[in-house]
Image (spheres, coloured by chain):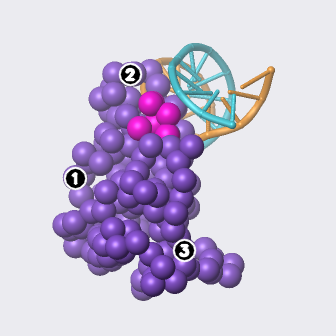
Chain colours: A purple, B orange, C cyan
Amino acid sequence: MRTLLVELLIATRDGQFVARYSEKGLAELDFPRVGRASPRAVKLIGVPAPIRRWHRATAAALKNVLARRPAKIFPPLDLSNGTTFQRKVWNTLRKIARGQTKSYGEIARAIGSPRAVRAVGGACGTNPIPVLVPCHRVLAANKKLGGFSGGLNWKRELLSREGVMFR
DNA sequence: AGCCAGTCTCGGA
DNA sequence: TCCGAGACTGGCT
């Protein structure tokens, strides 16, 4: 099992995100908690240089997306915690360009399991790095919104900021 | 064994 | 057109 090394915060206009890093890169990103005490951030001084560098990339990418700009630079992503199926889904999500969408069925076809549409939804729901692994760009058939583990308001908001139309 | 962030079909409002 | 019920689905816990 992957070991998380460092937990760092990212303050944005939309709240305080939480990023967690393993020795391989960014492993988890959490939406801001509402009505809960913010987690303690590790002091930056004790953080290895590579992780500090990754964190700068994470923070910049996140803030760019939230500000309706392209992400430009990404940190290395550590998706090694997922199953083979989940990693296939997550890697396919990363190919969906900003402002574009795909359906759960299209993802299922793209990974060669055309009937696993519900399982694709499940894998989207366990995506450890939302926003940067753009699970919000997956809509149900006929451009209906579908679900979102981070809350449908976030899905609506992220899609709106990318100029995407949905029903 | 049971739960799902789906999708299709069909019938009624 | 739109919504709900029902059938069917595959991966995960």
Residue pictured at 48% horizontal, 49% vertical: A127
Between the residue at mark 3 and the residue at mark 1, the CA separation in whole angstroms equals 24 Å
Q: Earlier in the sequence, mark 3 or mark 1?
A: 3
Residue bounds of the magenta highlight: A82-87
Amino acid bearing label 1: Ala
Residue at disc 2, secondary structure: loop
Q: Chain for mark 2?
A: A
Q: Earlier in the sequence, mark 2 or mark 1?
A: 1
Residue A164 position, x and y percent, is: 28, 59
Amino acid bearing label 2: Pro
**Mark 2 highlights which residue?**
A114
Residue pictured at 44% horizontal, 51% vertical: A145
What mark, if any, has residue A97 been given in the picture? 1
Instruction: Determine if marks 3 and 2 fall on one subunit.
Output: yes
Between the residue at mark 2 and the residue at mark 1, the CA separation in whole angstroms equals 22 Å
Please say if A162 is above or below A2. Answer: below
The verdict on residue A84 being magenta is: yes
Determine whether, in the image, residue A129 is placed left or right of residue A39.
left
What mark, if any, has residue A32 been given in the picture? 3
